[in-house]
Image (cartoon, rainbow, N blue to C red):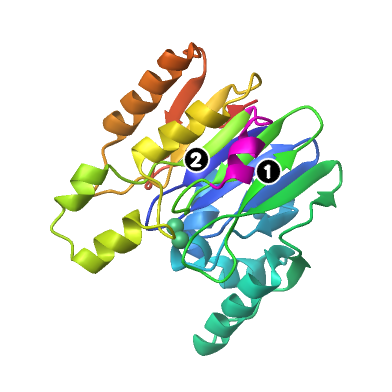
Amino acid sequence: MKYCVLASGSQANATVVESGNVRLLIDAGLRCRTLEARLKAIAVTPESLNGILITHEHVDHVAGLARFVKKYPLPVFANYNTAAVIERQCLLEQLPVPEFALFDSNLPFLLEHLTITPMQIPHDTAEPVGYLLDDGEHCLGYFTDLGYVPEPVVQALRRCSGLILESNHDLQMLRQSGRGFQLISRISGRAGHLSNEQACEAVANGAGAALKIITLAHLSAECNQPELALSLMKGTLKHLGRSEIHVAIARQNQPLPFMEL
Ligand SMILES: [Zn+2]
Ligand SMILES: [Zn+2]
């Protein structure tokens, strides 16, 4: 299994995951043309994708979805509540409504040999989820846009050999950002985004023996610094005696290389 984060941050999010003959996109927050360009940059054709997994309906996760699947018809996997909001948004904006393949957020489903387990996470949208993708050999966890890490997700991390985990903000930088009280409360609140410290705590509590690569994702451009998030996570891993785990920082403006599990 391998994955490539095409973009991550508060402007746009999209990740390619590949295992055997299955190739998926997680979220389509890049505009259609940018998404096409970034796929091309990593030599992936849109036609070779088997589907798109949606985490939630915020615009930084679905901005390019309607146009992309109109051009390249693909099943869009989402739970009912998320699909319903996206459908309403599309109708309002006079965009084509995607063809949804609905799942129950409490039940794993199969795509060829890949077991996809949605996991509910706390975020201020209809029914936000993260994902575990397991091909029998490797398991990748994808958890961004969550106010805190619920216990079932901490337990699920134990299975992961790859982990894409939100490390959104440094709490002090957020508090000193000059943003309004309400916005600061929303971001740092129970239905907001994970801080660097929360990401480290999740790894400290949940990292299993198989964990090989962590990609820190959804970093705030104004309230975080890649070096800070990286050094905190590396410090945590050193403390755990797991310095062999590779840590990468996902970027907003360029794809990372493929990470092979
Ligand atoms: Zn987001
Ligand atoms: Zn969000």
Q: Amino acid at mark 1?
A: Leu
Q: Position of residue 208 (x, y in %)?
A: 62, 24
Quadrant location, the N terminus: top right
Asked whether 160 falls inside the magenta stretch, the response is yes
Q: In this view, which residue lies farthest toward the right?
A: 112
* Residue 42 visible in the displayed image: no
| Sequence-earlier tag: 1 or 2 | 1
Quadrant location, the C terminus: top right
* Residue 202 visible in the displayed image: yes
Residue at x 26% of width, y 37% of height:
225
Q: Secondary structure at mark 1?
A: strand
Q: Is mark 2 within 8 Å of ligand 1?
A: no
Count of marks, rendered view: 2
Left or right: 254 in relation to 140: left
| Foreground residue among 96 and 43 | 96
**Residue marked by disc 2:** 165
Q: Is mark 1 within 8 Å of ligand 1?
A: no
Q: In terms of image quadrants, where is residue 196?
A: top left
Q: Position of residue 67 (x, y in %)?
A: 57, 71
Rendered position, 103 above or below 245? below
- In the image, the segment drawn in magenta is 150-161
Q: Position of residue 38 (x, y in %)?
A: 50, 48
Asked whether 11 falls inside the magenta stretch, the response is no
Q: Position of residue 51 (x, y in %)?
A: 72, 57
Rendered position, 50 above or below 182? above
Q: CA distance from mark 1 to mark 2?
A: 12 Å
Q: Secondary structure at mark 2?
A: strand
Residue 132, numbered circle? 1
Left or right: 189 in relation to 170: right
Q: Amino acid at mark 2?
A: Leu
